[in-house]
Amino acid sequence: MLRYFSHNSEEYRKNAVGLAKIESIYFPSMGLMIGLSTLMAIMIGGIYVIYGRHNTDLGTITEICHLYHHADLSGQRHRLGRQHGPARLRLAETTE
Protein backbone atom coordinates (compact mmCIF):
# COMPACT_ATOMS: atom_id res chain seq x y z
CA MET A 1 0.00 0.00 0.00
CA LEU A 2 2.84 2.39 0.84
CA ARG A 3 4.48 1.67 -2.50
CA TYR A 4 1.22 2.56 -4.29
CA PHE A 5 1.04 5.99 -2.62
CA SER A 6 4.75 6.58 -3.06
CA HIS A 7 4.55 5.86 -6.79
CA ASN A 8 1.44 7.98 -7.29
CA SER A 9 2.89 10.79 -5.21
CA GLU A 10 6.08 10.88 -7.28
CA GLU A 11 4.11 10.77 -10.55
CA TYR A 12 1.89 13.60 -9.35
CA ARG A 13 4.92 15.66 -8.32
CA LYS A 14 6.52 15.24 -11.76
CA ASN A 15 3.28 16.25 -13.48
CA ALA A 16 2.80 19.23 -11.16
CA VAL A 17 6.37 20.48 -11.77
CA GLY A 18 5.90 20.12 -15.54
CA LEU A 19 2.63 22.03 -15.40
CA ALA A 20 4.19 24.74 -13.23
CA LYS A 21 7.00 25.20 -15.78
CA ILE A 22 4.52 25.64 -18.61
CA GLU A 23 2.26 27.97 -16.66
CA SER A 24 5.20 30.08 -15.49
CA ILE A 25 5.77 31.06 -19.11
CA TYR A 26 2.27 30.85 -20.57
CA PHE A 27 0.17 32.94 -18.18
CA PRO A 28 2.55 35.88 -17.76
CA SER A 29 2.91 36.06 -21.53
CA MET A 30 -0.88 36.04 -21.91
CA GLY A 31 -1.09 38.87 -19.39
CA LEU A 32 1.51 40.78 -21.38
CA MET A 33 -0.40 40.21 -24.62
CA ILE A 34 -3.68 41.38 -23.08
CA GLY A 35 -1.95 44.42 -21.57
CA LEU A 36 -0.34 45.35 -24.89
CA SER A 37 -3.61 44.90 -26.77
CA THR A 38 -5.36 47.13 -24.22
CA LEU A 39 -2.69 49.79 -24.63
CA MET A 40 -3.00 49.57 -28.41
CA ALA A 41 -6.79 49.91 -28.19
CA ILE A 42 -6.43 52.99 -25.99
CA MET A 43 -3.76 54.50 -28.22
CA ILE A 44 -5.53 53.90 -31.53
CA GLY A 45 -8.92 54.79 -30.05
CA GLY A 46 -7.47 57.96 -28.56
CA ILE A 47 -6.15 58.99 -31.97
CA TYR A 48 -9.58 58.32 -33.47
CA VAL A 49 -11.27 60.44 -30.78
CA ILE A 50 -8.78 63.29 -31.15
CA TYR A 51 -9.20 63.45 -34.92
CA GLY A 52 -12.92 62.59 -34.90
CA ARG A 53 -12.63 59.54 -37.15
CA HIS A 54 -15.07 56.59 -37.41
CA ASN A 55 -17.63 58.19 -35.08
CA THR A 56 -15.60 56.99 -32.09
CA ASP A 57 -16.10 58.43 -28.63
CA LEU A 58 -14.47 57.78 -25.26
CA GLY A 59 -17.26 55.39 -24.21
CA THR A 60 -16.44 53.03 -27.09
CA ILE A 61 -12.79 52.84 -26.07
CA THR A 62 -13.75 52.21 -22.44
CA GLU A 63 -16.08 49.42 -23.54
CA ILE A 64 -13.35 47.72 -25.56
CA CYS A 65 -10.90 47.88 -22.63
CA HIS A 66 -13.61 46.48 -20.35
CA LEU A 67 -14.02 43.50 -22.69
CA TYR A 68 -10.26 42.85 -22.64
CA HIS A 69 -10.33 42.87 -18.84
CA HIS A 70 -13.17 40.31 -18.73
CA ALA A 71 -11.34 38.06 -21.20
CA ASP A 72 -8.32 38.08 -18.89
CA LEU A 73 -10.42 37.26 -15.83
CA SER A 74 -12.23 34.38 -17.54
CA GLY A 75 -8.87 32.91 -18.54
CA GLN A 76 -7.69 33.07 -14.93
CA ARG A 77 -10.87 31.36 -13.70
CA HIS A 78 -10.40 28.62 -16.28
CA ARG A 79 -6.80 28.08 -15.16
CA LEU A 80 -7.77 27.78 -11.48
CA GLY A 81 -10.53 25.30 -12.29
CA ARG A 82 -8.11 23.24 -14.35
CA GLN A 83 -5.52 23.24 -11.57
CA HIS A 84 -7.89 22.04 -8.87
CA GLY A 85 -9.73 19.50 -11.04
CA PRO A 86 -7.13 16.71 -10.72
CA ALA A 87 -7.01 17.19 -6.95
CA ARG A 88 -10.78 16.74 -6.77
CA LEU A 89 -10.54 13.54 -8.84
CA ARG A 90 -7.80 12.11 -6.61
CA LEU A 91 -9.80 12.93 -3.52
CA ALA A 92 -12.84 11.20 -4.99
CA GLU A 93 -10.75 8.11 -5.82
CA THR A 94 -9.31 7.82 -2.33
CA THR A 95 -12.64 8.29 -0.57
CA GLU A 96 -14.46 5.63 -2.57
Image: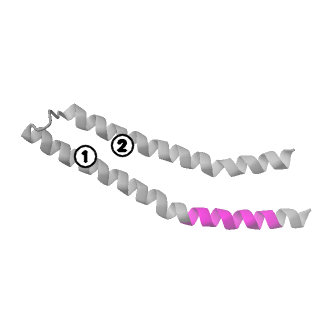
- In the picture, measured across the screen, residue 48 lies left or right of residue 5, that is left
Q: Residues within 10 Å of mark 2 (few under 14, many from 20)?
A: some
- In the picture, measured across the screen, residue 72 lies left or right of residue 2, that is left
Q: Which residue is mark 1?
A: 41
In the displayed structure, would residue 88 be above or below residue 61?
A: below
In the displayed structure, would residue 46 be above or below residue 7?
A: above
Quarter of the image containing the C terminus?
Answer: top right
User: Residue 9 colored magenta?
Assistant: yes
User: The disc labelled 2 sits on which kind of residue?
Assistant: Tyr
User: In terms of depth relative to the viewer, which is nearer, 6 or 82?
Assistant: 82
Please state the horizontal and vertical placement of residue 2, each as a whole percent of the image: 89, 64
Quarter of the image containing the N terminus?
Answer: bottom right
Please state the horizontal and vertical placement of residue 12, each as a whole percent of the image: 72, 62
Q: Which residue is mark 2?
A: 68
User: In terms of depth relative to the viewer, which is nearer, 60 or 84?
Assistant: 60
Question: Colour scheme of this structure image?
Answer: one colour
Circle 1 SS class: helix
Q: Residue at x 84, y 62 (%)?
A: 5
Quarter of the view holding residue 47: top left
Taken as a whole, is the magenta stretch helix, strand or loop?
helix
User: The disc labelled 1 sits on which kind of residue?
Assistant: Ala
Label annotation for residue 29 = none
Q: Residue at x 67, y 64 (%)?
A: 15
Q: Residues within 10 Å of mark 1 (few under 14, many from 20)?
A: some
Kindly report the distance in space between the C-alpha atoms of the residues bearing marks 2 and 1: 10 Å
- Marks 2 and 1: CB-CB under 8 Å? yes
Please state the horizontal and vertical placement of residue 53, each as a whole percent of the image: 11, 38
Q: Which residues are magenta?
A: 7-21
